[in-house]
Image (cartoon, coloured by chain):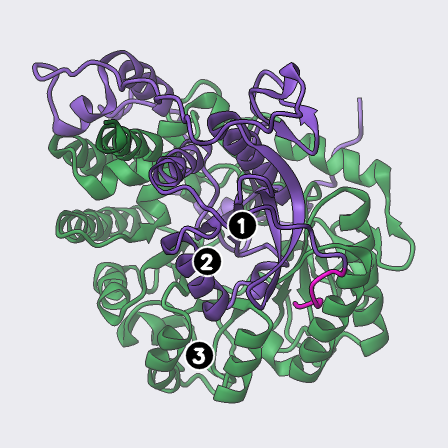
Amino acid sequence: MKKKLPVVGKPTPAAAQRELAVKPVQAGSRPEFPTRNELYRKAGLLGGATLLAGGLANAEPPAKPLPPTPSIKPPAAETASLEGGSINGKALPATPPKIRVYREGGGIGPSEDMWNLDEVQSYISWTMAKEGRLAITTKYKLDYDGVKITLDGFDPDRNVGYAYIDKRDPERAQFTPAVRQKLDDWMKGQKLAIMFVEVKRYPDPAALKGKVIKFLHAVQKAPPTAGKIPQATTPPPAKK
Amino acid sequence: MNALVHLTHDCNLRCPYCFTGKKFDREMPIETAKQTVEFVVEYAKQHGQRAVFSFFGGEPMMAWPTLREMVLHAEAVAAEAGVTALFRMNTNGMLIKDEHLRFFEEHDLIFILSIDGNKAMHDRERVTESGAGSFDVLAKKLPRFLEHNPGMMASVVITPANVVHAADGIAFLFDTGFRFLIIKPDVTQTWSRDDIAELERQYERVADDYLARTRRGDELYLNLIDDKWINHAKGAEGISIRCDVGSSQISIAPSGNIYPCVRWVKEEEDTVPRLGDVWRGLDPDRLDKIRAESHAPKQPCGDCSYNDGRCANECACEHYSATGRIDTPAPALCEHERVMVPIADRIGNTLWRERNPVFMQKLYPRLVQMRVDRSTDEEATP
């Protein structure tokens, strides 16, 4: 058995707390509100809106599956295995990559939510490729309309892609207000469709998937028409 | 890797409850600061982590030139290593000026402010060497601090001496514009039965005030209540390790010695084994020992029904400071939790019955997102 830390020999502060005691509680207070697992499981059966509305009597059927996206099809040259979407020329794994949000720190304050940026980007790339049947190239160097940026994922044949930033993303500085305005303009003008996602708190897979689906619906309604944009050969200027 | 870097043992205040040991003029030499950066970045690189530098003290702003130099050096070293460097600080705020705030903005340094509520509460404990209260100086800076960072966290300590002001003090901070409060009772002090009764009265008022603010739509964080709700909602498998001494967090003293936690950086006493130093690195045997003891079940807690993540009995170094044992909480901590858990449940149950949107978003974000996704799907479906 490993030796324990030295026990302080002198009287401790706790020794002066004579009127108090450590007393385990056998049947203490319990919350009425459920755990997330309990509620999510229930919501999966009954529909999330029902529980939010506060009753089961108005239970609604589960959400309809996403309709196919006919305007976004894989390039003809791709093999059958890539029809369901691809990332860097490789067929998608059957299940999406996981985003592990864990806690780090504490002691002097609350511990912080931490995550791995690569995992988040892999998840979005997978979701976008899968839902939109896109051929995503990661870390795509875009040089277009006077803007030089690195996109986290982009399908150069369909002109559909995304940029994800959060407070820990070292590349977030490249998305200045002017660049963001360009992204909006391209989307409105049906030139390029770049989904810009900025996460303020922590990346939640369900929320990210919702954003991707909403974005792809918008793309489906107004597909971009800029034609194939070759990847820039020189990297964008390094910024903090 | 979250490295809590003690830039100095000195402080411009003399709060009686301070747990970081004696105050004396010993700053971290610049060579040690640079070596600390290199050690932390290398560790983060090897373990695929971010390098988080949390400046601590004493009062870290008393070592401003070193802090500034360290941030610049860390950015350069981290960029070269391909590691993300993040900067945090715990400060009493007394020495912070506009020029510092500009630097913090440029370098994304986020600070947690130590402030004990309103003037009556704050000045009871947070005093200068002459014994004068420090509230008036700090209060003038608060509007600028909150403009600089509207999400700034305030750290409040409750003691037997200031507990009578706790509810008013906490309400004052929310009214001033703070949205995130961390309240810690000092369980190393001599709390009496009467003090605990007063604590309960104060916490009931704090909870009722928090309920009212949540009902009117304020999105706030109060660790006393939110942590208990969230740990319950996450369930046993989802509870995070809230204190992870020596695992992803270490404390580095001005000498370069590495300790498991800020509470154990007492170089003038040196009663706690060090984990190593920034030149030779971490001692794996000591690290294993401290991790194992930190994660072991707490001795007297047994099958307590609050020992399901709701009880804040996770801080190994707090136990060591209070009881001399890493696995034994102080009686004052147990009394505090037996007061607080039912209060948090009462407020949570009320908000749950009301399906309060702020409460639902905090505890069940995916459920709220499901509704958003669903309405989006239906809107887009022809």
Q: Residue at x 11, y 34 (%)?
A: B354
Q: State which chain disc 2 sits on.
A: A
Q: Type of residue at label 1?
A: Ala
Q: Is residue A75 visible?
A: yes
**What is the x, y in percent for residue B192?**
34, 50
Q: Are marks 1 and 3 in contact (CB under 8 Å)?
A: no
Out of B272 and B242, give the one closest to the viewer.
Answer: B242
Res. A163 mark: 1
Q: Residues within 10 Å of mark 1 (few under 14, many from 20)?
A: many
Q: Is residue B324 visible?
A: no
Q: Type of residue at label 2?
A: Leu
Mark 2 → mark 3, Cα distance in angstroms: 53 Å
Mark 2 vs mark 3: give the one in front. 2
Quarter of the image with the C terminus of chain B is: top left
Res. A183 mark: 2
Q: Residues within 10 Å of mark 2 (few under 14, many from 20)?
A: many
Q: Residues within 10 Å of mark 3 (few under 14, many from 20)?
A: some
Looking at the image, the residue that sits furthest to the left is A57
Magenta highlight: main SS: loop
Circle 3 is placed at which residue position? Answer: B127
- Give SS at disc 2: helix
Q: Residue at x 56, y 69 (%)?
A: B109
Picture quarter containing residue B308?
top left
Q: Colour of chain B?
A: green
Circle nearer the N terminus (1, 2): 1
The answer to whether residue B345 is magenta is no
What's drawn in magenta, residue-wise?
A234-240
Picture quarter containing residue B374?
top left
Out of A144 and B37, give the one closest to the viewer.
Answer: A144
Q: Are marks 1 and 2 in contact (CB under 8 Å)?
A: yes
Mark 1 → mark 2, Cα distance in angstroms: 10 Å
